[in-house]
Amino acid sequence: MMKPKLLISACLCGKNTKYNGGNNLLSRLPEIEEKFDLYLICPEVMGGLSTPRDPSENRGDLVFSDKGKDVTREFNLGAQKALNIALENHINIALLKESSPSCGSHKVYDGTFSGVKISGQGVAAKLLKEHKIKIFSEEEIDLLLQDK
């Protein structure tokens, strides 16, 4: 029997794609890999940003680095590429890094670089959700595994 396909933030799989060059490896990754075929994405890298890179935060529909550079174009390009992977592979579920300016599904930083989180979605998470892809964060792994 074929496993369902899961779009997943590459940093959650141990890939060093975070802005600081690190990752967010999930301790429960083996459990997830057992149930799903994984399709790794990092919208920020896919949009042309380097690793490491300046941290970025959302300000409305725009994204700025902590140096004041508008990186909205790169974030939108990466989000579109992530969506294309989902559509081309008929993927309707994603596990994304919470609070990321690309992948945050419930919370993002407020754009002031002060560590404050607000309700909102990252650029890629929002685009995927608009295309009826069900989004889970790493804080919702139990829900993801039972939803399957």
Image (cartoon, grey):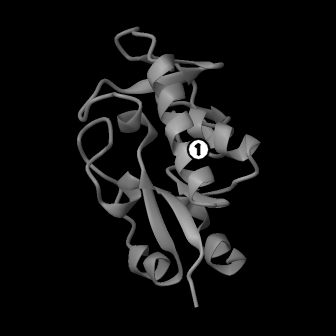
The image shows residue 111 at horizontal and vertical percentages of 53, 20
Q: In the shown orientation, is residue 65 left or right of residue 22?
A: right
| Viewer-side residue, 18 vs 36 | 36
- Considering the numbered disc 1 on the image, is that residue within a helix, a strand or a loop? helix
The image shows residue 143 at horizontal and vertical percentages of 67, 72
Direction top: furthest residue: 68
Q: Quadrant of the N terminus?
A: bottom right
The image shows residue 24 at horizontal and vertical percentages of 36, 55
Q: Quadrant of the C terminus?
A: bottom right
Relative to 22, residue 111 above or below: above
Q: Residue at x 39, y 66 (%)?
A: 26
Relative to 52, residue 4 above or below: below
Residue at the disc numbered 1: 83
Observer able to see residue 133: yes
Q: What kind of residue is marked 1?
A: Leu
Q: Residues within 10 Å of mark 1 (few under 14, many from 20)?
A: many
Dividing the picture into quarters, in which one does residue 55 lie? top left
Direction bottom: furthest residue: 1
Number of numbered discs: 1
Q: Residue at x 68, y 80 (%)?
A: 146
Q: Residue at x 67, y 60 (%)?
A: 92
Observer able to see residue 114: no
The image shows residue 85 at horizontal and vertical percentages of 52, 50
Relative to 17, residue 45 above or below: above
Q: In the shown orientation, is residue 49 left or right of residue 117?
A: left
Relative to 31, residue 110 above or below: above
Q: In the shown orientation, is residue 142 left or right of residue 47?
A: right
